Amino acid sequence: MSSACEQPGMSSIEQAVEALTGLLARPAANLQLPLLQAHGRLLAEDIHARHDVPLWDNSAMDGYALNSADLPPEGGRLPLAGCQAAGDAAIELPPGHCMQIFTGAVVPVGADTVIPQENCRRETDGVVFAPVRPGQNIRRQGEETRVGQPLLGSGTRLRAQEIGLLASQGYAAVKVSRALRVGIISSGNELCDPGSALGPGQIYDSNRYLLASVLQGWGFEVHQYPHLRDNLDDTVQLLRRASGEQDLLISSGGVSVGEADYLKQAVQQLGQLNLWRVAIQPGKPLAFGTIGQTPWIGLPGNPAASLVTALIIARPALLATQSQTPAAPAILPALADFEWQKTSVRTRYLQARLQVGNGQMQAQLHPQQSSAMLANCCWADGLVVIPAQQPVQPGDPVGFIPYHALLQP
């Protein structure tokens, strides 16, 4: 059984991120996945073009293919000789003729120009053209990519665009990094699962669902364990089992210094426990360590505090396990549409909305900033960042982080 390592004083947000980053390790294995199952994953290989795109010169328009040398500078009439449809092999264009062609069809042999059908006049025995510019409306072979050209690097997150690009090159499956397996645990006799009837003094376990949704949005494989009741033996047994099944365990609640909780006792019995106070609000209590060889992070129990701590402190450390160095979310400039005089030694993250006023972006605060609430988080578009010891007056510049920037990987 190890002792709890209590960090003296208050740690900065940057120190907390660094500590969690050092705690976590990248999963070693990669896996091959069918293309549609690879959406949202990180590539574990470099991708090169297997062929030219386009594969051949093709038409960018529905219209008529011709050889520009067959027309005088002022334009003229050419007899029509057949049709070149998409999916058909290239037909040879007879000299002095034009040929109907459809978008995506291979350019007929001998043609060098395509004229859109709306820019010419079809007659019974031919087509009349205005002056033409050689090479019009033809997509040239390889103008997008050339065979062997690097397309995607290892570590690229596969969005819809990348999936489409891979399909265009004939890839049916790709090698991706295995997602971190994360187990979510809540503790306390007062918790009740959604869908069950509440007993006296009970509340529904929202944090387990909140954190699982956040982690799934970041691309991790999430497993929810039954919430722990206040029993040391049961807690030790579940943590021992979960640590053997997951790459990381995350719990919420029971991590404040001096707070009596069987979860902390069980972590000490099975591994290493660190208790920190971080200069962040909502938040402050942060626990982390190992259960056996498995990393563990303990977040605050209040829902808004648990959410903010996960987004600001845990997110960069977790995304680093996917061979990804996450860019710090952009802090958007706005003007305060509020007054804030509650200065603190901690950086505050306040639930806020952006709105346009007098042609400028203004940040409006929710009237309730309690860390125990989730309704204010649902109302908000993001978080206003108030540095330590800084009051805010209406019209002062403030920084705003949109929730969508934090909830995406």
Image (cartoon, grey):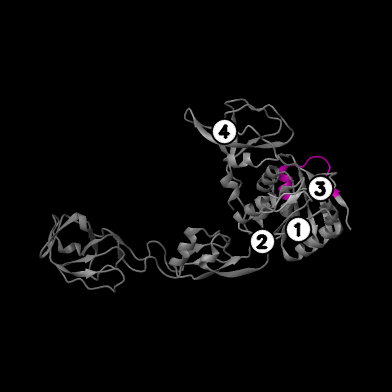
Q: Do the residues labelled 4 and 3 touch (CB within 8 Å)?
A: no
As measured in the structure, the alpha-carbon distance from the residue carrying label 4 to the one carrying label 2 is 36 Å
Q: Are marks 3 and 1 in contact (CB under 8 Å)?
A: no
As measured in the structure, the alpha-carbon distance from the residue carrying label 3 to the one carrying label 2 is 24 Å
From the viewer's perspective, is residue 138 above or below residue 203?
below
As measured in the structure, the alpha-carbon distance from the residue carrying label 2 to the one carrying label 1 is 12 Å
From the viewer's perspective, is residue 163 above or below residue 356?
below
In x, y percent, where is residue 197? 70, 51
Q: What residue type is labelled 2?
A: Leu
Few, some or many residues within 10 Å of mark 2 (<14, 14–19, 20+):
many
Residue stretch in magenta? 5-19
In x, y percent, where is residue 323? 63, 59
From the viewer's perspective, is residue 117 above or below residue 92?
above
Q: In terms of secondary structure, where does tag 1 sit?
A: strand
As measured in the structure, the alpha-carbon distance from the residue carrying label 4 to the one carrying label 1 is 38 Å
> Relative to residue 206, is residue 33 drawn left or right?
left
Q: Which mark is residue 295?
A: 1
In x, y percent, where is residue 48? 49, 67
Q: Which amino acid does label 1 sit on?
A: Pro
Q: Which amino acid does label 3 sit on?
A: Leu
Report which quarter residue 285 is drawn in.
top right
Q: Name the foreground residue: 211 vs 117.
A: 211
> Disc 2 marks which residue?
180
Q: Name the foreground residue: 330 vs 255.
A: 255
> Relative to residue 38, is residue 278 drawn left or right?
right
Q: Which mark is residue 275?
A: 3
> Disc 4 marks which residue?
363
